[in-house]
Amino acid sequence: MKEFSKYISSFAYLYAASVCAMEGMEQLEKNDVILASVCFVSCFFATLAVFRFQVAGFIYWCRDRF
């Protein structure tokens, strides 16, 4: 069950990153640079959260393997 919750949270962070990126693009079209910047920073951190799970899994795999 713990592994399943990691997949769900990875999907949630990826979904949040895509929503933030789309919202940032909309705000750029409206020439609202400040709000677009906030959206893109949020997108960046959500993307880091997705890859944090991947990197942590790879590090644990390497630690057990070698």
Image: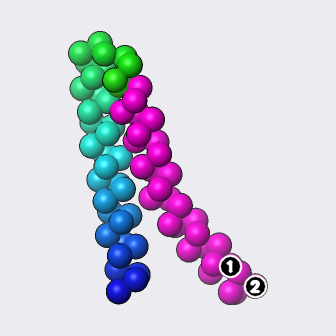
Q: Does the CB distance between marks 2 and 1 fall below 8 Å? A: yes
Residue depicted at 24% across the width and 26% down the height: 26
Residue depicted at 56% across the width and 74% down the height: 57
Q: Position of residue 36 (x, y in %)?
A: 35, 25
Left or right? Give the position of 33 relative to 19: right
The quadrant of the image that shows the N terminus is bottom left
Left or right? Give the position of 53 relative to 37: right
Secondary structure beneath dot 1 equals helix
Q: Please name the residue that numbered disc 1 is placed on.
A: 62
Residue depicted at 44% across the width and 50% down the height: 47
**Within 10 angstroms of label 1, few (less than 14), some, or many (20 or more) residues?**
few
Q: Amino acid at mark 1?
A: Cys
Q: Amino acid at mark 2?
A: Phe
**Within 10 angstroms of label 2, few (less than 14), some, or many (20 or more) residues?**
few
Q: Main secondary structure of the magenta part?
A: helix
The quadrant of the image that shows the C terminus is bottom right
Q: Is residue 19 above or below residue 14?
A: above
Q: Is residue 24 above or below residue 2?
A: above
Q: Gap between marks 2 and 1, in whole Å? A: 6 Å
Q: Please name the residue that numbered disc 2 is placed on.
A: 66
Q: Nearer the viewer, residue 45 or 64?
A: 45
Q: Quadrant of residue 29?
A: top left
Residue depicted at 41% across the width and 40% down the height: 42
Magenta residues (range):
37-66
Q: Is residue 36 above or below residue 40?
A: above
Q: Nearer the viewer, residue 62 or 48?
A: 48
Where residue 6 is drawn, which disc sits there? Answer: none
Left or right? Give the position of 20 relative to 46: left
Q: Quadrant of residue 3?
A: bottom left
The question of residue 60 being in magenta is answered with yes
Secondary structure beneath dot 2 equals loop
Q: Position of residue 60 (x, y in %)?
A: 63, 78
